Image: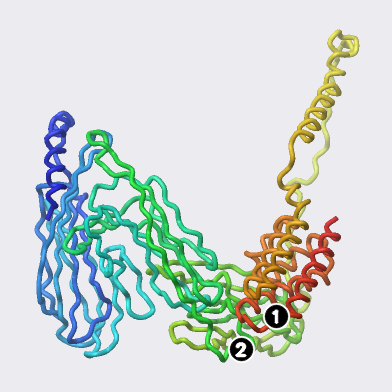
Amino acid sequence: MIPKRTGNALRLALLVALPALASAGWKGISAGEVELSATADASEVALDGTLTLRIAVTYASKADTGNLEVPTFADFDVVSRSQSEQVTFTLSNSTPSFRRTVITSLALTPRRAGDLTIEPVKLEFRGQRFQTEPIQVRVVPAGQALRRRPPGPDRLADDRLGESLDPFADLHPGQRDLILRAMVDNERPFVGQQVTYSLYLLARTNVSSIEKLQIPRLDGFWSEDVEAPQQLVPEQRILDGVPYTAYLLRRRALFPLRPGKAAIEPAEVQVLTGFGMLFSRESSRRSSQALQLEVQPLPPGKPAGFDFGNVGQWTLSASAEPSNAPVGQPITFRMVASGRGNVRDLRLPRLPVLSGVRAYDATVSDKETIERGQINGTRTVEQLLVPERTGAVEIPSLAMDIFDPVQKQFRTVRTDPIALRVDAGPVGQPAAEPISQNLLAKGGIRPIRLHLGSVQRATPPWAQPWFWPALGLPPFGLALLLGIARLRRMLQVDPGRKRMELARSAAAKRLRRARALLQRGESVAFYAEIVRAVTGYLADKQGIAAAGLTRDELVSALLARGQPEEPVRRLVRILDDCDRARFAPGSGESPAREAMLGRTDQVLGELDRGTR
């Protein structure tokens, strides 16, 4: 159904555009411009419940429609059926385009429990046939919990860990034409658990483009982009009986870093509305609502070897190839952790020292995928092992402690032990075949052939009139270039060099700010300020982005820059103590915090002297 205001504008646009249509020879669309989709609002339903099947057909033509064939539903009964329609008209570069969307909603109730299938929906349009994919639905006995899934081909909200809520269920737009809506899928996450932040634009006017989008600062979260659409994809919604078009603007994955209350400030968007050349455009600015999150600390009973980055649903496996190898031949040990969570902050167990086996440094690779708005990751650790004696070698079981936010408990995942067999190498054969190098081409070395001929003595170059000016030109040009370069260095200041020179004073300033926070009793902010002082100094003075490195990588980077090992180890110990205190506020006493300030200042001073 088209609103009255939209219908009047459409009729006016058609009257103005008819000459342009005739001159352009516009004859309609092809069958390839039809879009057919079918989605269910639930992946699991009770035997006495209902689910809604939403069938959307979008045509690039105002008049032509196809023949929609609804399946007979062998496992479901149709309770009710409704249909709505919306037509939009746009002009882009003097070219008209129509978009007609017909939405058919069917309320279905299952006939039996188990894994059921909703058959494909078929459409016949201009002699061509289209069909959707079948939809799998799990039917459970009456009264059990359901896993809901919101409607729409792109799903306006993702599957949640528990019951899913419609992002617009509590929205009452009234007379507003443009609404910017922000939402999160979990308002009470655990520390390190993913929270999906989504931003939607709701409009009942024609949206031409997004001029500017400002995402709020996400302090206190590790954030990554999940969806950043480059084009506006419409999704039809009915709010308080009024049709709206919803556009997904941004979706991000947030991982809380500390417990307590966390606030997400409003987002802002600048929207351009109107039909373009024939009608006046209007620029509007909208702001979303602020969001509040209650980040829960991890429950008591944390294992001794647990790391705060190991939050999620993870599995751990290990393999070694080949399992039988002669002495001196390398064996590749591979350990893989995969699952759902922040894979970049995951800490895997280390391979212990194996008797009779020489182990080389491990290489780590990460891979991330996005499934239904959730970040899934895989971290692979590969290590080269070279056996030095014959016999049986066993790689023991490796364990990793994790916190599963779905089960709300700590778990330990383990790998299976791996048995290796090392045999004696063939007699007289080296451990590894050398690569042939510096081989002569076929035929060996050929003799040098000389070709003699007569020449005439020419005038020496220094007797030419151009020789002496040309001889003096390079020194003069070099002196000129050096002078210009020196003048440029005198007139400009290198920002990087200035930042390096002021790195120590900037760190001292942050330490003074940390002391002020300590006097006010803000322990969590005190440790966070110390971490910012250390990481800021490393970024400005040493050129090391410590936030994206593991502790071992940070130690290796500092040692590679010629820093003494002892101050480096103490610096890493300070960062570990700060992280531990930030996630366990109240565990440190005031004298220990005073000592933390002194330790940090002393270590930074030693690193600064080592840099000089």
Q: Quadrant of residue 283?
A: top left
| Location of mark 2 (residue) | 397
Disc 2 on helix, strand or loop?
loop
Most foreground residue, 204 or 140: 204
- Give the side of residue 225 with respect to residue 247, left or right: right
| Picture layout, residue 590 above or below residue 272 | below
Q: Residue at x 16, y 47 (%)?
A: 6
Most foreground residue, 609 or 415: 609
| Location of mark 1 (residue) | 326
Q: Position of residue 354 (x, y in %)?
A: 72, 85
Kind of residue sitting beneath label 1: Pro
Tell which residue pokes out farthest to the top in this image: 465
Q: Position of residue 453 (x, y in %)?
A: 84, 18
**Which numbered disc flags the more N-terminal residue, 2 or 1?**
1
Crowd band around label 2 with a 10 angstrom C-alpha radius: few (<14), some (14–19), many (20+): few
In which quadrant will I find the C terminus? bottom right
Q: Quadrant of residue 37?
A: bottom left
Q: Residue at x 31, y 68 (%)?
A: 167
